[in-house]
Amino acid sequence: MYNILWAVFAVAFFLSLAATPLAIKIAPKIGAIDVPKDERRMHTHSMPRFGGMAIFIGTTAAMLIFMHSEPKVPVIIIGGVLIYILGIIDDLKNLPAKVKFLGQIAIAILMYVYDVRIEFISNFFGEGRNELGTAVCFIVTIIWIVGITNTVNLIDGLDGLAAGTSAIASLCIAYVAYIHGMYLACGAMLALAGGALGFLPYNFYPAKIFMGDGGSLYLGFMLSALSILGPVKSATIVAVIIPVLVLGVPIFDTAFAIFRRVINKRPIMEADKGHLHHRLMKLGYGQRRATLMLYSVSGIMGIAAVTFSRGLWVETMGLFAIAFLMIYIFLTDANHIMPQIKASPNTGEKAENVVERGHTEEYNK
């Protein structure tokens, strides 16, 4: 079993790694190009955004090779194909937010119909579990799948952020599943992690390609659907608490974004520059540093999920405190130098523009 799990990861990783250069070549031919049209964009030049193809190929192929006979896996693969197609159409045609949202709900309903659903919540304080009624089961499942799908989509704002965070989350959930004997969930999460990590060398700053909505929606959907396979179903753990802990940072960021837009009387689906990664960029950390900072917090939350699954409450709370303290320090460090407001001594040009111009020139060589 141990060797098979490594094989699942290796197949997904190497297929994704090999497919990414192909995606870079295909993107201009089909019009999958991200052109910066507003100040919310962190890049200053056109960029191919078809990298989700590599993640999709690597993950799907690994699951088909090693897990095709499992009852629910083919259903999740079909759902992944549909959500990926939805994302590709959005990349090419720029779908209205409502249309994309309705498409996600339809795919989530399809998963529910074919028994990929959250049917119970374990009794947190003792033995047994609480079965959910049909209506509650339906609502919880739809909210879970659509919510996590959009969570990953919303954090895809810096080079390598969504791919790296999804890989960290997948690996942590895979480890929790492994130590609790849930080998199917472990293998599926390793396939997803391999696909994301194979793409990451081309997507980390300075990126050569973006994953696009096809990639971010696919990663979010697969994380939500595969976690329902049950990484931890012991009597003392809430059924979906592990992925919630691992994805704590993006989930918090998404919830805060919704709250912020409601307070400001703006549409919930409207994009803005108030996300955590945007705030770090405004403080002058730069894309590479900001991404690594968020990786570190996500990693700590992932470790907290592992300790929680083993009943180590004190350690879990300590890790929570460290993660939130890190975010507080990142956002409030008064002594941090903000290079975006410092002018270049020779030209008077803002340092941020100098860095971005250098990035552009390097990419165009």
Image: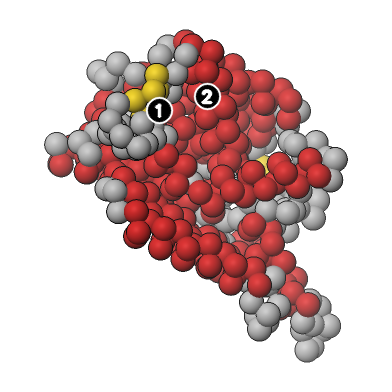
Q: Residue at coordinates 72% horizontally, 66% vertically from top-left?
A: 282
Quadrant (top left/top right/bottom left/bottom right) for the C terminus: bottom right
Q: Tell me the crowding category of disc 2: few under 14, some 14 to 19, or many 20 or more residues within 10 angstroms, Cα based.
A: some
Q: Residue at x 41, y 61 (%)?
A: 319
Please tell me whether mark 1 sits on a helix, a strand or a loop.
strand
- What number of labels is visible? 2
Residue extending farthest front: 126
Q: Secondary structure at mark 2?
A: helix
**Three-letter code for the amino acid on which mark 2 is drawn:** Val
Residue 29, position as x, y percentages in the image? 62, 36
Disc 2: which residue: 140
Residue 135: x %, y % from top left:
54, 13
311 or 293, which is in the foreground? 311
Q: Is residue 294 left or right of residue 120?
A: right
Residue at the far bottom: name it: 345
Q: Position of residue 360 (x, y in %)?
A: 67, 63
- Give 110 or 207, whichever is nearer the viewer: 110
User: Which residue type does callout 1 highlight?
Assistant: Ile
N-term mark: 1 or 2? 1
The answer for how far apart the CA atoms under marks 1 and 2 are is 11 Å
Residue under label 1: 121
197 versus 127 height, above or below: below
Left or right: residue 330 versus residue 124 is right
CA neighbours of label 1 inside 10 A, class few (<14), some (14 to 19), many (20+): many
